[in-house]
Image (cartoon, rainbow, N blue to C red):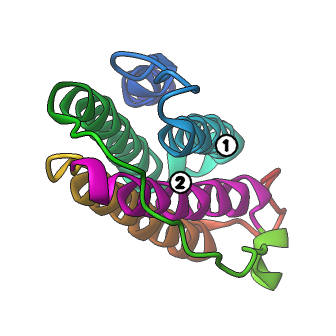
């Protein structure tokens, strides 16, 4: 039984060990997309750490893996946004990015710091993708890929929330290294 559980956990962790699709965009041409891609990559690392920390308790009920899949989908959309922007750019000045208030950790992030860090990184990624959409709006859109990347990141946020709820429901009284 224990070896079957180990095999199932290893299979669930396999998607967590890969690297996102095409790779980091060109920072000089797409600074906001690079920041969003990197924030999603950091979120992925935190999600993997959270899965490992909760291994004894069932790997977050599959929600960590689903969050990573959503992060991967968002990164793929960022890659497609870069490709689209390269192919469809129009001459002209870029758009103005509206300043926004800083993002901060939530008080309950102390309970599951890896999940809290993942959430914060995903929220930063969403902000940077939205900034990229504002910046690129006058010279050509991102072909709808910015919106899809935000959608993927929001799905990842939902799964992080579900992972926290699952951990709350299944955490033993001995405590968990989070």
Mark toward the viewer: 1 or 2: 2
In the rendered view, does 22 fall on the left or right side of 29? Answer: left
Q: Please tell me the numbered disc located at residue 174.
A: none
Q: Residues within 10 Å of mark 2 (few under 14, many from 20)?
A: many
Magenta-tinted stretch = 112-140
> Quarter holding the N terminus?
top left
State the residue position of label 2. Answer: 125
> Where on the picture, by quarter, is residue 123?
bottom right
Give the SS element for disc 1: helix
* Front position in the image: 73 or 146: 146
Q: Position of residue 163 (x, y in %)?
A: 50, 63
Q: Residue at x 78, y 75 (%)?
A: 104
User: Vertically, is 23 above or below 69?
Assistant: above
Q: Residue at x 59, y 51 (%)?
A: 57
Gap between marks 1 and 2 measured at Cα: 14 Å
* Front position in the image: 102 or 93: 93
Q: Residue at x 41, y 23 (%)?
A: 20
147 in the magenta segment: no
State the residue position of label 1. Answer: 46
Give the SS element for disc 2: helix
117 in the magenta segment: yes
* Front position in the image: 6 or 106: 106
Q: Residue at x 33, y 47 (%)?
A: 92
User: Vertically, is 125 above or below 170?
Assistant: above
């Amino acid at each position: 039984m224990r070896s079957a559980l180990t095999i199932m956990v290893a299979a669930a962790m396999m998607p967590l060990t890969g690297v996102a699709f095409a790779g980091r965009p060109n920072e000089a041409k797409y600074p906001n997309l690079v920041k969003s891609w990197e924030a999603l990559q950091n979120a992925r690392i935190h999600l993997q750490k959270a899965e490992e920390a909760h291994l004894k308790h069932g790997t977050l009920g599959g929600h960590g893996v689903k969050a990573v899949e959503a992060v991967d989908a968002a990164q793929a959309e960022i890659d497609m946004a870069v490709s689209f922007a390269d192919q469809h750019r129009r001459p002209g000045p870029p758009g103005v990015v509206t300043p926004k208030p800083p993002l901060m950790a939530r008080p309950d992030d102390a309970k599951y710091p890896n999940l809290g860090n993942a959430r914060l990184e995903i929220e930063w990624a969403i902000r940077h993708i939205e900034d990229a959409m504002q910046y690129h709006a006058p010279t050509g859109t991102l072909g709808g890929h910015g919106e899809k990347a935000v959608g993927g990141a929001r799905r990842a946020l939902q799964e992080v929330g579900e992972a926290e709820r699952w951990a709350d429901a299944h955490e033993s009284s001995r405590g968990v290294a989070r």
